[in-house]
Image: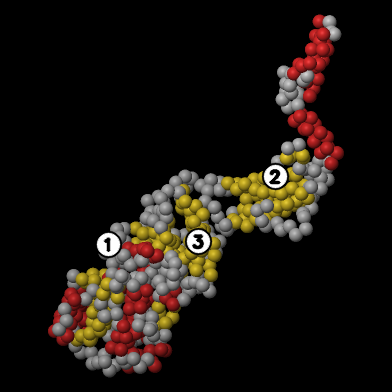
Amino acid sequence: MAPLPAPWAILLCRYSDDANDPSITTIADLAKQWRATRDAAFIAANLFPAWDSDGRTLLEICQNFFTVTGLFTFNSVRFWDEYSHGRIYTGDSEVFPCVLNRTIAQGAARAMSPGGPAYQNETFVLAKKALLQQHGKNWMDYAAVAVLFQSPDFGAQGGSYDGGPGVFMDIRYVKNNGVQAWGQEMGHAFGLDHSRTDGVVDANGVPLDYTDHWDVMSTRRSWSAPDPSYGMRGPGLNAWNMRSRSWLDETRVWKPPSGDFSNVVVELRPLHKRLLPGYLAAELPGIGGHSAYLVEFRTPEEWDAAIGWPKVLVHRFEGMIGQFLRTHSYIMRGTAGQDGLGVGEVFQIGAGPFTRMNVLSIDSATSTARIQMCHSANPPIARTVKIVAPPRSIGCYPTEVEGATMVLGFELQHSCSSNYQIQWTVGGAALPPGTVTNTAMLPIILPSANAPATVVLNLMFDDGFVITDTMQVSAISEAEANWRHLICALLNERKKPKQWWEWDPAMVRKAAGRLTPAKYKLVEQRLAAIQRLLDPHSK
C-alpha cells in the first residue's frame, strides 16, 4: 500500500523588527544573543553548551528536522513513517521563512492579552497570510501547519488552529527536544490525545494524562533519550494509538479465534520494525467494557533507547477510532503492578470471563519476544496438582513390591496454562541412577515393606505462584506379593464357576445313583459351601 502524503507547511516565523535572517543566523548566534539579553533562569533552562558550537542555520536545522533532507537523523519524517507502519509520509513537508506583520513588543502584548488559544489562533491567521503573500502558497494544500517562531515565544501546543490542524512552538523545541516534544504536538494535530495508565486517577477520580512512560503522547513523563541532532528523541507510539489513526498494519497483528482459547504462543517483533518478518502486535479480548487489548514488544534502541530493558506492553483504548482528540490509550499493568512486562511476568484481568498473557522469553539478539495467551468466558479454575501413582497391580501381579521401580506423574487442574517449573523431592526411597527431578515423570525405587517413603511435588509458576502435593508411598514384601498373587489367581480362576452338577454330568449321575436321598442332600450342601469359599460373591 502506497503511503498517504501528509506534507506539513512549517512557517518559520519572525517579527517585523527581528533582524535575524534564518538562512544566515546560526544556533550559536542565537545563543550568543540570548546569553547577553536573557535572565539567568532562562539561560539555565534553555541554553545548553551544545548551543554555543552549533553552526547550523535556523533554516537548516528546521529543514533537517521536518523534511526528507534529514531522513538519516532521528527526525520527524522518519518517526511518522516508522510509527505509521508506512501509512503516512511527511517527507514532502516544506519550511517557509515568514515575516509577520507584528513587532516583538506587539507580539508580547498579545501573548499577555488575550493570551492562550486566542493569541495562538490569531498568530496562525497572521502566519498563513504571510505564507500566501510571501511564498504564494495556500495553507490548505498541506496536511497541517506549524507556526515555529525563531525567537522564544509562549507555549508549545498541538491541535486545531484557524480551521485546520497545527502546532504552535518555537526554535528551542527543535534544538532541545526534537521528537520528544514535536512527536506529541504533531500527534495532537493528527488527532491523538494524551496517553494514560489504567487505574491512575486524581483525587476526584478523573484519569490522569501523561502517565504512560512508554508513549510519546505522555511527553511530560515519558522515557526520552538524548539525541545529538535535536536534543532528545522518542519514545515511540503504542500500538493502540497507531490503530486509532488506522496506522497499525493489521495484517501483522495476531487476532484471537472466536470463543475460548488457551496455550496460544505467538512470537512478536518490535512494534516499529516492520521490515522484520512476523507479528508486530497481538490482540486479546477486552474484559468489563474495555476495548480489545493490544500486546506489543519494545526494545531499548532507536526511538526507545531510554526504556532500559526490552519489555512487552499491553494497552487498551477509550473513545471512537478516528475521532479528533478526546480519545486516550491506557497502558495496562501486570499482576505485580508493573506496566512493562519481562520474562515470566503476567497480565491477567477478569474473574470470568478473563484474559491472560504471560511472557515466555525475550531474545534481544534476534529481536523477538514469545508470549502465551488465553481467554475464557468462565471464571478461572484454582490451580491444583495431584501426584498420580500407577495401578497397584497389573492383572494378578502386584506392582508395589519393595525394590521395584514405580513411576509417578501428576494431574494439573488450571484454567489457561502457564509456564511452570517442576521440582520433585523424595524422602525414604532411592532414585534410579541418572534420574532428574524436574521432569513430568519421576521413577523411584520402592522402599522396604512397612517403611513408607514421602514424595513431594512443587510446581512453581512464572507469576510466582507455587502449588504442592505430597504422597506417602508404601511397599509390600515379596512374600506378601506372592500370597496376593495366589489368592487373586484362585479367585480369578473361579470368578464365574459352573454349578456343581455341570462339572461332569456323567460322574454326577453315577454318584447320585449310589446315594440315598439324605446323603444326596448332604453332598449338595457341602458342594455349595465349597463354591462359596472359592467365590465369596456367589449366593
- The answer to whether the residue labelled 3 contacts the one labelled 1, judged by CB atoms less than 8 Å apart, is no
Say left or right for 151 vs 208.
left
Marking on residue 371: 3
Q: Which residue is mark 1?
A: 323
Mark 1 Cα shell of 10 Å, populated few (<14), some (14-19), many (≥20): few
User: Which residue is located at x 83 percent, y 12 percent?
Assistant: 511
Residue at x 49%, y 52% (from the top left corner)? 262
Q: Amino acid at mark 2?
A: Ala
Q: Nearer the viewer, residue 260 or 506?
A: 506
Horizontal side of residue 208 vs 95, given as left or right: right
CB within 8 Å, label 3 to label 2 = no
Disc number placed over residue 389 in the picture, else none: 2
Which mark is first along the chain, 2 or 3? 3
Examine the rendered structure and indicate whether residue 247 appears above or below residue 123: above
Q: Identify the residue shown where x is 53% and y is 67%.
A: 362
Measured as percent of width and height from the top left, residue 209 is found at: 37, 64
Residue extending farthest top: 517
In this picture the colour scheme is secondary structure
Label annotation for residue 149: none
Q: Is residue 37 above or below residue 144?
A: below
Circle 2 residues within 10 Å: few <14, some 14–19, many ≥20: few
Q: Of callouts 3 and 1, which one flags the residue occurring earlier in the amino acid sequence?
A: 1
Looking at the picture, how far across and down is residue 338, in whole percent? 50, 62
Q: Residues within 10 Å of mark 3 (few under 14, many from 20)?
A: many
Under circle 1, the secondary element is loop
| Quarter residue 399 falls in | top right
| Type of the residue with mark 3 | Ile
Distance of label 3 from label 1 (alpha carbons): 31 Å
Mark 2: which secondary structure? loop
Q: Can you say which quadrant of the picture contains the C terminus?
A: top right
